[in-house]
Image (spheres, rainbow, N blue to C red):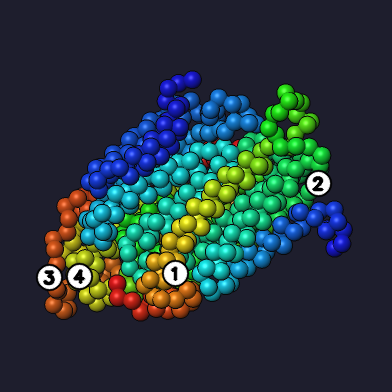
Amino acid sequence: MAKLFAEHLYETVSIILFGIGFTTLLLNRNLIKKIIGLNIMDTAIYLFLASMGYIEGRVAPIVVNNVTDTSAYINPVPSGLVLTGIVVSVSVTALMLALTVRLYRRYGTLDIDRIFVLAKGDEE
Amino acid sequence: MAFIQNVPFFSIILSMISGIFSSALKRKAARSVTIVLSAVVLAMNIMLTVFMLQTGESYTYMMGHYPAPFGNEIRAGLLESVMASVFALILLMSLLGGLNKIDEQIQEQKQNLYFIMADLMLASLLALVYTNDLFTAYVFIEINTIAAAALIMSRQNGHCLAAATRYMIMNLLASGLLLMGITMLYGITGHLLMSNIRESVANLFATGEYHTSLTVVVVLITVALCIKSALFPFQEWLPDAYGYSTPSSAAMLSSLISKSYIFLLIKIFYRVIGMEVVVSTGMTNILFLFGIIGMILGSVSAIRERDIRRMVAFSSVAQIGYIYMGLGLGTREGVIAAIFHMIIHAAAKSMLFLSASGLIDVSGDIKQFRPLRGSGYRHKAAGAAFTVGALSMVGVPLFGGFLSKVYFASSALDFGGIRAVIVLAALAVSTLLNTMYFLHTVISIYRPATQEVPAYNAPSKLSSAALWVMAAVNVALGTLSVPLYQAIARGLDMFS
């Protein structure tokens, strides 16, 4: 256990955060907290990705002072994936928030179980 | 390189451009754009299918002139072009068959948004079918999810909003698992292009290195795509999403979106991880088990349902179970049968949703069985289409569903052992259950009406015509299925 934290700190932490976010999104009844859980889960994956691309002692892959040797820079692909992933998670967060606003205006509650009960009784 | 080989790229980019430009168009123009677009995509992909049948070789297509491993790739083979043609055809028919309901149920100023979402959904379906890059697949899955949620909530009532929320939550959980799986796979192999990952995984599998990690990756990706395509324990979101949204949306969700995820899973099994690795992790056994349970329990829920559209939705759970059962056999024949059933079910289920809503329309908008009596005479096209779809799903000879059952049974017999017995027993029980609810409905729509029928509008000519065409397509799939089966078999061989 201690070895996990000592040798793979970022990976271990990101998996723990992923678990926290996942269970919050799955089990929490409050819609806003669900969305927070979603963001924690996504961010945990980005941490996992970013730590995978990082190489100790190297710099971000932006060419300065005409150093073109690849061994001077970290792996840029995971960073690119993180950027793409952030765009995706911003869009789904926006959609979820829009849905939450709609549901709150209609039913006056953020509790998802309560919303489903109320929606069942709705006229079509 | 023949000009026709550009079709995959053209059809994806055309759908995206149409989606973007439709935002500036009025609803009628946006509607025409979507219909023309799906017809054009259909025609192009049929041409590509003919071309692939002639050459018999798959090809990869480099995007943006960067060679691998930096660039992004599209790959086209026979199976891909067949699936793309089926998707475009069903999108076209679902839109035409449901246009009158879209007009009625969606606010006028928001209708162009509905068609934008349909365009984007088509783009993401095509991209999922054709892409050769795992991360691109992830991005398009998210676009697909957003478009699907928008299609559900486009009908602005409480049911649809709640159903869309439930759909989004389940799908976001699945997306998280999928992204984690892809990230781990990238971590072990160092590649994102499917063919490169396949090579590295084959090496790792041969040396036995990272066996646990590979198993975790397989489980994460499979579970994610099972949630998204509503395999049995994850079907909670399905009945509301399909049952309350506008009929076109229900048809698209059940026939296109869930099928695209299953297709992607098959693609990942064959082209990314390798079927022998998946079988060695035991994941196929789990898919087989839950497929069988889904077949039975989906039908049981459908029997208990009193609302015809939710009944059809529950029947989807059962049919998805069939597909996963075939996939869970893990043999070539089993997977071919699963893909064949995917196409048959897509064609039949979209038609069932549209015709069910047509039947409800001429029965005073009540979703019980008794008022539906005689509706088959009041709306002839919907009655005929519902009958054809029901017969196909039950598995009456001459209809598509019968053949897929035959293929499932024969692939199970080839597999042998206890599994063959389980498949045959499950097929028998499930056919019996299907007969109970589908034929009961068919009989009741053709019985004379026992109560006064409330006034109703005459069924729209366009949707009736679309339903007749769909019924004809389904009968054709059932009677002329041998070329389709052979094309799938050849396509699957081109796959790996």
Q: Residue at x 28, y 53 (%)?
A: B111
The residue beneath circle 3 is B455
The residue beneath circle 4 is B363
Q: Quadrant of residue B363?
A: bottom left
> Is residue B84 shown left or right of residue B443?
right
The residue beneath circle 1 is B299
User: Distance between the Cα atoms at labels 4 and 1?
Assistant: 25 Å
> Is residue B115 shown left or right of residue B164?
left
The C terminus of chain B: image quadrant: top right
Q: Residue at x 19, y 71 (%)?
A: B364
Q: Nearer the viewer, residue B138 or B366?
A: B138
Q: Residue at x 34, y 63 (%)?
A: B245
Q: Amino acid at mark 4?
A: Ser
Q: Position of residue B371 (x, y in %)?
A: 22, 75
| Residue B281 in sight in this render | no
The residue beneath circle 2 is B209
Q: Residues within 10 Å of mark 1 (few under 14, many from 20)?
A: many
Q: Amino acid at mark 3?
A: Ala
Q: Earlier in the sequence, mark 2 or mark 3?
A: 2
